[in-house]
Image (spheres, rainbow, N blue to C red):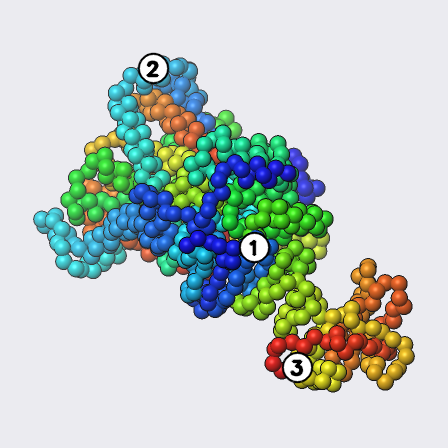
Amino acid sequence: MSIASVTATRDAPVSAILPARGGMLGALSDLFWRRPRFLLVLMLMPPLLWLGVVYIGSLLALLLQSFFSIDEFSGLINRQFTLKTYADLLQPANFDIIVRTVTMAALVTLASIAVAFPIAYYAARYAQGRWKALFYLAVMLPLWSSYLVKVYAWKLILAKEGILTWLLAKLHLLWLLDGWLALPYVGGNSLSVSATGTFIAFVYVWLPFMILPMQAALERVPGNLVEASSDLGASPGQTFRNVLFPLALPGIVAGSIFTFSLTLGDYIVPQIIGTSRLFIGQAVYSQQGTAGNIPLAAAFAVVPIVIMGFYLWGAKRMGAFDAL
Amino acid sequence: MRSDRSQSAPLGLKIAATCGLLFLHLPILLIFIYAFTTEEKSYQWPPPGLTTQWLAVTWNRPDVWEALSLSVRVAAISTLVALILGTLCAAAVSRSRFFGRETVSLLVILPIALPGIITGIALRSAFALTEIPFSFWTIVLGHATFCVVVVYNNAVARFRRTSGSLIEASYDLGADGFQTFRHVVLPNIATALLAGGMLAFALSFDEVIVTTFTAGQQQTLPIWMLEELIRPRQRPVTNVVAMVVVLVTLLPILLAYYLTRDGDQVAGAGK
Amino acid sequence: MIADEMTPAVSFQKVARHFGAVKAVDALDLDIAAGEFFAMLGPSGSGKTTCLRLIAGFEQPTAGTISIFGERAEGVPPYRRNVNTVFQDYALFPHLNVLDNVAYGLMVKGIGKAERLKAAEEALALVQLPGYGARRPGQLSGGQRQRVALARALVNQPKVLLLDEPLGALDLKLRENMQEELKSLQKALGITFVFVTHDQGEALSMADRVAVFNEGRIMQVGSPQEIYQRPKTRFVADFVGSSNVLPPDFVQRYAGQRRWGSLRPEAIRITRETGSDAIQARVSGVSYLGAATRLALDTEGLRLHASVPSGTAVPEQGDAVAFTFNRDAIHLMDEAP
């Protein structure tokens, strides 16, 4: 052992308490140490100022505007508290927009669940090691790749002269497409200007948001639980209904928060792929833009907030936030 | 495929999962083919011929360059702001328990949890009320607001994984607050911050909904694309730009994944 | 203030540390002598770790004064105390190699690179890890990490070295080796060691003096022998080793005083004869421990434990036996009946 040499390297400090380092940094460091709350406040100040004042302030400004009204003759905003703008929402034309959007959001959510489940289940239960990483990337890359490009891709696919029509023609199934397009509500001139097209694009764009929380929830289902269920003689269908689905439910609810909320607030997908019938997002956009009716736009924007408020409240009660 | 559970997936599940993944990926791949089509006026499939001329045409378009430059500048500044705000917030939330901790977390997540159109119109009405004219900085303001959350998520996950006793050990060994930050905290969270920054950059670079409300007359690359989608002028150029955008966002995502793959939570769960 | 020979290394006067309503440490007086190997022993939540953190400076006292070598330490941040800690989870910096970990303390004090790396090498040799400098902490075993943590603290030549459950994460064999090594290291360096443990065997075998903690207070301070043979309270008797705690009535009958008492298991002798001074009992449990066999005896509504050396005849469970003990072996405790 070389105790002596360790001790001899430097002169041993005499004092047990070292003097303050001095200088501004030393003093500041001592101050932060003595007053940890002060440092905490200092750290929280910039983000709270930004998010709490700028962002929440803007939301409040929005809320405030929704209680103003617009003078129908001059087109100027009348800055007086009124519920008239909210009453306008209930006019048939506006109310239709809300119903249409909520229906679309619900359908998109259901379809996303159906498409996402096999992927999430496979990734959670069967994929291992490198395959798991690959699966993860395979969901992650589409999630993060450009939203507009994704919408654009579907414009290409669904166009009358596009790949889908070509494929159906090759399969001699064009009659099916024509039949579908002839239907009311879901049909149209071509898929890219039909509600069906809007629906497909929505499902596509939001699908990864459903897969990830669903997979997270399924990861927590022990594999032997599924085996136990089939050992006990349950058919695959029964196992799914009675074991898998209830256990995956928090993840499904968490995913549906995304698909539902994102569909409610989107205005680009229906604008690029869809009919001329408006969705809430488009209504907000056109009311604040071309129509210049900011109060009505604000009131429209409050609708998804309120719907999502209820939705989140329900989801929280189902324990969906643990799966996020 | 190896499986600990000594059984492989049922065929039906395999088919359904494969179809699901193809559904996710084929449309993006299609973009790459369309970027080389000789067809100018429609979305005709199959392409009548393939050409690389549109790459050159796009290269020589000043409006594309301007939009790209604006997007990069906005994304860079927004990422910087988000890095600072998100790290501060994450450090505060994970290092101490204080009243309102949950509220701060909620506040950070809110801009991304609410539909973009709400963030957009809220900012716009605030600009209108306070009579702030649209500028480069109004775009940055919007982008930084929703980028904070990705940095925050990455940093919080790393802070949670970093043992609190490391900081105590540093103090114990005679390092003051600043030395501890420089020699212990920063090296330990650096890759998480880099990953968060990458994701924030990708998020900002791609954003269109909030931007339509905060940009005024300026065009970021997504706004440029949106214009082209609504009122197409030269479809082949749009195709090429779409391909470039896919490639440009791919890199930071892969890098962020690589940086956080050992153990951190899902790199993009906050999007 | 210059520390003289008599100045205690650490001195607590009426020290309290409250967390809201929880009194982690309450009105504590304690002197730890310079050069001493001092153990703080107690169950989890007894306040021993809080005491350690008060010395290190991670906690501040709610009341009272703490002095380190005669200098007041309240309000002094940990980085200005010449006191170093070996953490329970070792807290090695994962982004630095072993050598840079050990040199960290010297680096932040501004000591030149060549000099600090040389000192770090020597410290590694001291803990018998020479040549491990280039490795990452993640590549070391638990025992090696602990040695690195030790070297990282010792290289700073602290006036007091604090060890928080230093052997808790090691397996039995390693733990025994490390106990001896720590002890000889402490003797050789002459640094005051203060270590926290919940393992009474560890405390008794390593320390010069032991403080037994319970509910934020010190129950007893003394040499291992004192603590083991003359516990002052039922808690100490019960927690340190496995003394039989005797109620006042029982003690009055056999020792003449109405006090709580304690009796070591090895002081009890099992006999076959039923003499006048033998006590009748029934064997309600037998556990073989290797060097001895431990018997549970039920008598007079009391359960006593006896330790019978291996090699002697051992009764079976359910047997009626008699036992005796030397009346002097009953230790009277301070605690009031």
Mark 2 or 3, closer to the camera: 3
Q: Disc 2 sits on a residue from what chain?
A: B
Q: Position of residue C86 (x, y in %)?
A: 55, 48
Quadrant containing the N terminus of chain B is top right
The amino acid type, in three-letter code, at marker 3 is: Arg
The amino acid type, in three-letter code, at marker 2 is: Ala
On residue A277, the disc is none
Q: Disc 1 sits on a residue from what chain?
A: C
The amino acid type, in three-letter code, at marker 1 is: Val
- Residue A68 left/right relative to C145: left
Q: Disc 3 sits on a residue from what chain?
A: C
Q: Count residues near mark 3 (Cα–Cα under 10 Å), then give few for <14, some for 14-19, many for 20+.
A: many
Report the residue marked by disc 1: C194
| Mark 1, secondary structure of its residue | strand
Where is A138 relative to A246, above or below? above
Could you tell which of marks 3 and 1 lies nearer the N-terminus?
1
